[in-house]
Image: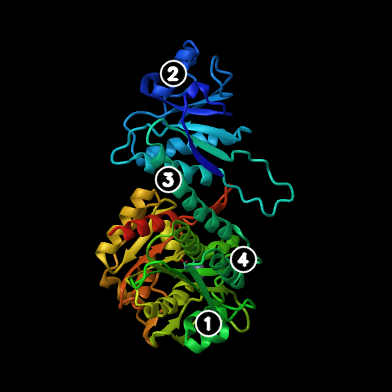
Amino acid sequence: MEFNVKSGLPEKQRTACIIVGVHENYKLSDTAKKIDDISKGYLSSILQSGDLKDKLGQTLLLYKVPGINAERVLLVNCGNDIDDNQYRKIITSSVNALLKTRIKEAICHLTYLEIANRDIAWKIKQVVEITQATAYFFNQFKTKPDDHSLNKMLFGISSNRDIAKRACLDAQKIADGIKLAKDLGNLPSNICNPSYLANQAKNLAKLHIKLTCKVLDKAAIKKEGMNTLLAVGQGSNEPPKLITLEYNNGGKAAPVVLVGKGVTFDSGGISIKPSKDMDEMKYDMCGAASVLGVLSVVAELQLPINVIGIIPSVENMPSGTATKPGDIVTSLSGQTVEILNTDAEGRLILCDALTYAERYKPDVVIDIATLTGACVIALGGHAIGLLGNNDSLIQDLLEAGELSGDRAWQLPLWDDYQKQLDSPFADMANIGGREGGTITAACFLSRFTEKYKWAHLDIAGTAWISGKKKGATGRSVSLLVQYLMEYCVK
Ligand code: BES
Ligand code: MN
Ligand code: ZN
């Protein structure tokens, strides 16, 4: 998609559609007012009919409005005194209204809306991210792709042109990183396997000189002593990979390390999952996809920092060589784990990657993982689960979530939960029972992250949408990019 700014009188703008706001009691926005005047009261007369319902985000598409050059006018109910989330709703439903037509291009006149503490750049960024996300279709495997045509959104703007243009360009880069994560998530596991993810990382490194990629194969992983990672991959014919992608643009500064769960298919292993919706376990690499998405954005934005992406990637399968419940394995940290449930595999690949992260002497480490079904139950599809060992890092991530709209919610990582992981045979078990499943999973990880500031994002509920509109969301890319942008100016 293409985004840009466009000045000039709204009534003169030649476009397929011009999007304008209407407020409570049919009060017209300035732009709508101008169009109304030119058309001799056409908009107000139509509004009198009551067809634009008095509900935030309702839209009404008008054709051939007299006296103006645009082919259509989309009226959007923008309510009054809106907040961040209401703004996002307004934009989403506007874009959805456009997608019901064959409109290819539109000019958005909704950046005038006043929202507390939000400037023009924020509003443009939201529109860009939402438009590209809403107009996204994964057509790669359709022999006859549907023709969804919206491919250009312009911002009708009369002042602050340079700021707006800059915001457009930056937001486009972020939206492209989100798209990369979605595309990877949506790919089926027969294509997107650990080797495929490794090649994607290598391709990114070819595109940007500040990115370097290294991939450890099975033998190298074994040599390192990453046995819990190996234990998860050993039932599959697909070889495991440990992918690192380093972005160096911050001199000698300690890096931010991002660790992404890259299980390209999670059958559960010997503790096999029920067959219903098992296809969705192709999304179990969305943490890895986020890491690749974020690193591509960081490289595009040329942020003045060092960021390391670490992706442990495996396929979790049952077979004669698979790990069996009760098996005991020594992790890279030296701690032993009794694997009571082979379906609690994410933490097993993450724990070795988190220990591996120590060698980068990180300033902070953030892992991103579709880790627990319990997180889906606790927070649903709206908030990312957030836990960690450092309050100020947690605070920064919560704020980045609010600002980007990619919101997270903190859960407690109290010591009280740790004993649920006790094992009679090893240093710990890999499961902690049904109660507080998201928390005990994070407790498990916390035993491998004591040497640095660490936060954990559980994206199990947010990384994809189920049902008819099934698909990856790219959630956590926007939050993490926002966090890193703020990190640069701290
Ligand atoms: N990848 C799953 C978590 C998951 C499940 C994400 C459903 C999204 C939807 C993870 O590997 C897993 O299977 N976790 C188990 C852990 C349990 C065995 C302790 C779970 O949540 O059921
Ligand atoms: Mn699992
Ligand atoms: Zn999993």
Measured from the top left, where is residue 256 in percent x and y? 37, 68
In this view, the mark in front (4 or 3):
3
What crowding class fits label 2: few (fewer than 14 Cα within 10 Å), some (14-19), or many (20 or more)? some
The label shown at residue 438 is none
What crowding class fits label 4: few (fewer than 14 Cα within 10 Å), some (14-19), or many (20 or more)? many
Q: Earlier in the sequence, mark 4 or mark 2?
A: 2
Q: Which residue is labeled 4 in the image?
A: 192
In this view, the mark in front (1 or 3):
3
Measured from the top left, where is residue 110 in percent x and y? 42, 32
451 with respect to 19 (left or right): left
Marks 4/3: CA–CA distance: 34 Å
Q: Which residue is labeled 3 in the image?
A: 166
Measured from the top left, where is residue 476 in percent x and y? 43, 57
In this view, the mark in front (4 or 2):
2
Q: Nearer the viewer, residue 306 or 22?
A: 306
The label shown at residue 230 is 1
Disc 4 element = loop
Q: Which residue is labeled 2 in the image?
A: 34
